[in-house]
Image (cartoon, rainbow, N blue to C red):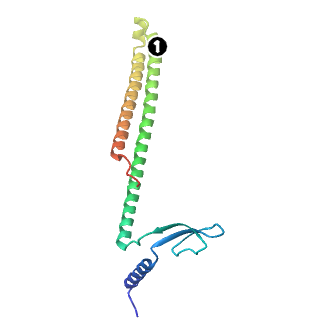
Amino acid sequence: MNLPKISLRFLSLLLSLAISNALADKLYTWTDEKGHLHITDEPPPHTAKVRDVIEYAPRSLQELNAIHAREEKRSQERQRDSQSQQKVLEAKRRAEDAEIRAKEAVQHAEEVTRSTQKYIWRLGSTIEKKRRFRKRIQALEKQIEAAQAQAREAVEQAKIAAEAARIAEEEAGPPANSF
């Protein structure tokens, strides 16, 4: 007889369900005379020391499918949580990096301002020197402005990165229960 593959699979599934339903509804935990632990679905010999008898009801196909669906849903939730937490950690790392760059830029701007202003003061200590080094003084003042602008930009980028990290954390929310 030539049965299609689907019918053979269906018959094998029915047969396995029938066998599992025919199995005992008890599991026995017992120790033999040598001290070895056994877990079986057959009653232990009379000489064995019974530790526990667990009664169970075989699960139907619908129950097994429901359990599998719940496990799959939990697995997907854990994966989403993991991805969300990775995004949060990456956003926090970017925010920390931006904050470090901002602090360095601010420190650099302060150093440039301090040293350049001293030099400008020396160049312009008299009216004659101010006229003579006017273009040089203007160039140095532009250097100060550029360094300060870079520092302000770095601070702004750090604020944006910190806000992005905060939003990522809010969107991720608390992790789903693994139970």
Q: Nearer the viewer, residue 99 or 62?
A: 62
Residue 166, percent from left and from top? 35, 39
Image height check: is 119 above or below 149? above
Quadrant of the frame with the C terminus: bottom left
Residue 112, percent from left and from top? 46, 21
Secondary structure beneath dot 1 equals helix
Residue 17, percent from left and from top? 41, 78
Image height check: is 58 above or below 12? above
Q: Which residue is mark 1?
A: 118
Q: Nearer the viewer, residue 7 or 140?
A: 7
Q: Residue at x 46, y 76 (%)?
A: 24
Mark 1 burial class by Cα count in 10 Å: few <14, some 14-19, many 20+: few
Quadrant in which residue 38 is drawn: bottom right
Image height check: is 7 above or below 115? below
Quadrant of the frame with the N terminus: bottom left
Q: Residue at x 42, y 82 (%)?
A: 15
Q: Residue furthest front?
A: 46
Residue type beneath disc 1: Lys
49 lies left or right of 148 = right
Residue 145, percent from left and from top? 38, 23
Q: Residue furthest bottom?
A: 1
Quadrant in which residue 130 is drawn: top left
Q: Nearer the viewer, residue 67 or 34?
A: 34
